Image (cartoon, rainbow, N blue to C red):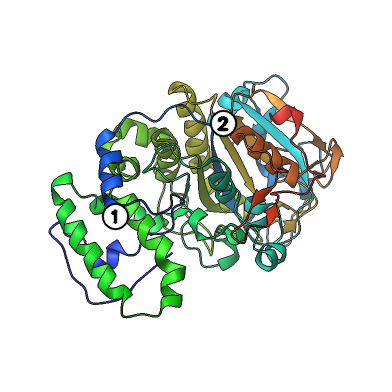
Amino acid sequence: MLTLSGPRMRYCDRVSRRSFLQVGGLALGGLTLPQLLRAESAGGAVGRHKSVIMVYLSGGLAHQDTFDLKPEAPAEVRGEFKPIDTSVPGLQVCELLPRMAKVMDRCTLVRSVVGQRDEHSSFQNLTGYTMGETQRDGRPNFGSLAARVLGPTHPVVPPFVDLFPTMQHRPYNSTGAGYLGPAFNQIRADGEDVASMKLRYVEHAKFSDRRRLLEQIDRFRRTVDDADIDAMDESYHRAFDVLTSSRVVEALDLEKEDPKLRDRYGRGSAKHLGDGAPMWNDQLLIARRLVEAGVRVVTVAYGFWDTHGNNFGHMKAHLPTFDAGISSLIEDLHERGLERDCSVIVWGEFGRTPKINKDAGRDHWAPVQAALLAGGGVSGGRVVGATDKTAAYAAERPIDYREILASVYHRLGVDPHEFVRDANDRPVTALPEDFRPVRDLI
């Protein structure tokens, strides 16, 4: 996120210069003010477009206590929770997920996700590569690659908006465009900033104040080194692009939403859990609103599931919020006719150990986890793969996590094996050739 310090000055819209310049990246290129004014005044509805909402469960959710219960396993494996029936005959989920049980006929559950490393980071989910590989090679976030290939749906709507908050454990935080270059970075609507984003909207009558702000930015540019400006120039343009578009800021403003719908989602809290993400269900609703506004990819970091101790107490406290938020998102997409074009994927970096430890917790378990997918025009009510009697290993149809990501790309209309040009004009691909979309998921 670009942050420029300096004296605090407030403009007529009560936005400080510093706050204005704390807006993150946007893959639109630098539109001029006249272009932005013409685009915004032209308005017009965004046409139908393929989109993805990825919900990343920081810390790794216990699959055997949510979507892959083993009631016949020994007590030290099966845990405290009972399975309940769902809208799909023969499919059961945890008793703490009654609303999810009702929408499972609209979901595809993959119980046999394999291939991930025991690594507390979002990198594998977001890029298809480990943290070391991503950092070494500059691998881009999947949303950045989609922005590079597909571009925006509207001149002043970013292709990729990131709702990850800034988390204490840094590897949980999302990655950027890497070797694609800063033009394809995401808008970072940091969780702590979402509530204030609506204050940054300026009516058309106040555009003159923005022109004066640009003049001040130009003066600032003359006081710093050209090398610094080269790295930040894209961010200047993108920050201005976003703030001159009411479409995006209005999507972030839940005061415009029906309070009954917000209550149905279960608003959650912006307070972080552990060193991970909050369970802020407002962000799930914002994700749907952003997709409706024309955004192609929205990423949400959701909850903290690193339950080395008190696993069952943590689940009792937080699974009801998860149940309300994720089920409402799926229902909302269907009710608004978005289910054919918008895909939802919910997953973490790994599962949890089959055996409960001495602290009533479950530790890291990379060999297998579960992933939940919905929408994207794919028929629901499916279960792909299965684990063994203790949910320790994939017993049927193991699906590599990169195959899941390949399927997400496919749903967006992106070929993850097609060559694209990076910022240095080198041909690159999103994923290795070996990892193809899964037929049941597309």
Characterize the local packing of mark 1: few (<14), some (14-19) or many (20 or more) Cα atoms within 10 angstroms: some
Give whichever of discs 2 and 1 has the lower sequence position. 2
Which of the labelled discs sits on residue 188, or is there none?
Answer: none
On the rendered structure, is 43 left or right of 135? left
Q: In the rendered image, is residue 380 in sight?
A: yes
Q: Visible in this render: residue 349?
A: no
Q: Is residue 41 left or right of residue 159?
A: left
Q: Position of residue 294 (x, y in %)?
A: 42, 36
What residue would you read off at disc 2?
100
Name the quadrant of the N terminus: bottom left
How many numbered discs sit on the rendered protein? 2
Residue 424: image location, x then y, percent = 62, 61
**Residue drawn at the location 69% of the way across and 43% of the way down:** 416
Residue at disc 2, secondary structure: helix
Residue 72, by quadrant, is: top right
Residue 140 image point, x, y percent: 61, 56
Give, as a three-letter code, the residue at label 2.
Answer: Met
Question: Distance between the Cα atoms at labels 2 and 1?
Answer: 31 Å
Residue 409: which quarter of the image? top right
Residue 375 position by quadrant = top right
Helix or strand or loop: what does disc 1 sit on?
A: helix
Which residue shows up at 61% across the image and 48% down it? Answer: 142
Closest to the observer: 356 or 57? Answer: 57
Q: Can you name the residue that lies furthest to the front here?
A: 425
Q: Residue at x 67, y 40 (%)?
A: 371
Amino acid found under the numbered disc labelled 1:
Ser
> Where's the C terminus, which quadrant?
top right
At 32% from the left and 64% from the top, the residue drawn is: 21
Q: Nearer the viewer, mark 2 or mark 1?
A: 1
Q: Within 10 angstroms of label 2, few (less than 14), some, or many (20 or more) residues?
A: many
Question: Residue 196's mark?
Answer: 1
